[in-house]
Image: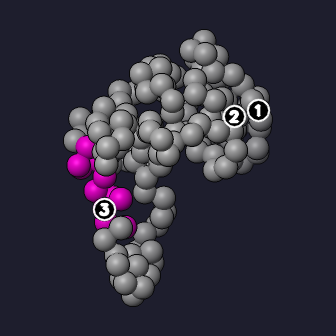
Amino acid sequence: MRSATAGLAAVCFLLAACDKGAEQAAVERVVNPISYVEIPVTDLDRAAAFYAGVFGFDLERATIDGYDMALFPAGPGGGAAGALAKGDVYRPSREGAIVYFRVADIDAVLARAVALGGSVLYPRKDIGEFGHVAEIADSEGNRIALSQPVD
C-alpha cells in the first residue's frame, strides 16, 4: 500500500512548475492532465465504507494539510490518484464536475451502490462504441458516474 506522501507525488509534480515555461512544458508532456481528484464527504467513515464496498478496494487514511482523507489506491495501470476528503472547505454536491469510475460490470456496481445506501441517478445507458455509463449518488450525496468500456 502506498504512503500518503507517495500518493501525492503526481500532484507535487504539477504544482512544482512555478513559471509559465515550466508549466507549459509539463502540460505538453502529460498525456492526461488529471492527476488527482478529491471527493467531498461529511462522514469519512461512512464514505470510506461505501467506496470500499462498491468498488472493492481499500482506502488509506491520512491527514493532509489538516484535513482528514481516505486515499484511493494508485499505481501503475490505474487511473488518477484521489481521495475522499472531509473538512470545512469540502461540501458534497450533485452539481459541478463529475468523476467517472471505470468498472468491469456496471450492473453489479449499481446493485452494490444501492445496497450500501446510494441511489441511481441515471440508469445504465448504452453509448455505442464507448460501452455503457450510469450515475449514482454516493453515501454523502455526491453525483459520481460509472463507465463500462466495450470489451
Q: Are marks 2 and 1 in contact (CB under 8 Å)?
A: yes
Q: Please name which of the two marks, 3 or 1, marks the residue nearer to the observer.
A: 3
Q: Nearer the viewer, residue 8 or 58?
A: 8
The image shows residue 115 at horizontal and vertical percentages of 60, 12
The image shows residue 147 at horizontal and vertical percentages of 62, 39
Residue designated by label 2 = 135
3D distance between C-alphas at marks 2 and 3? 30 Å
Residue pushed farthest top?
A: 115
The quarter holding residue 83 reads top left
Which is more N-terminal, label 1 or label 2? Answer: 1
Residue designated by label 1 = 122
Residue plotted at (56% across, 15% down): 116
Label 1: few (<14), some or many (≥20) within 10 Å? Answer: some
The image shows residue 85 at horizontal and vertical percentages of 44, 39
Specify whether 140 is left or right of 11. right
Would you say residue 9 sits in the magenta stretch? yes
Would you say residue 52 sits in the magenta stretch? no
Q: Amino acid at mark 1?
A: Tyr
The image shows residue 34 at horizontal and vertical percentages of 48, 58
Q: Secondary structure at mark 2?
A: strand
3D distance between C-alphas at marks 3 and 1? 35 Å
Q: Amino acid at mark 3?
A: Cys
Residue designated by label 3 = 12
Q: Are marks 3 and 1 in contact (CB under 8 Å)?
A: no
Position of the N terminus by quadrant: top left
Label 2: few (<14), some or many (≥20) within 10 Å? Answer: many
Magenta span of residues: 4-14
Q: Amino acid at mark 2?
A: Glu
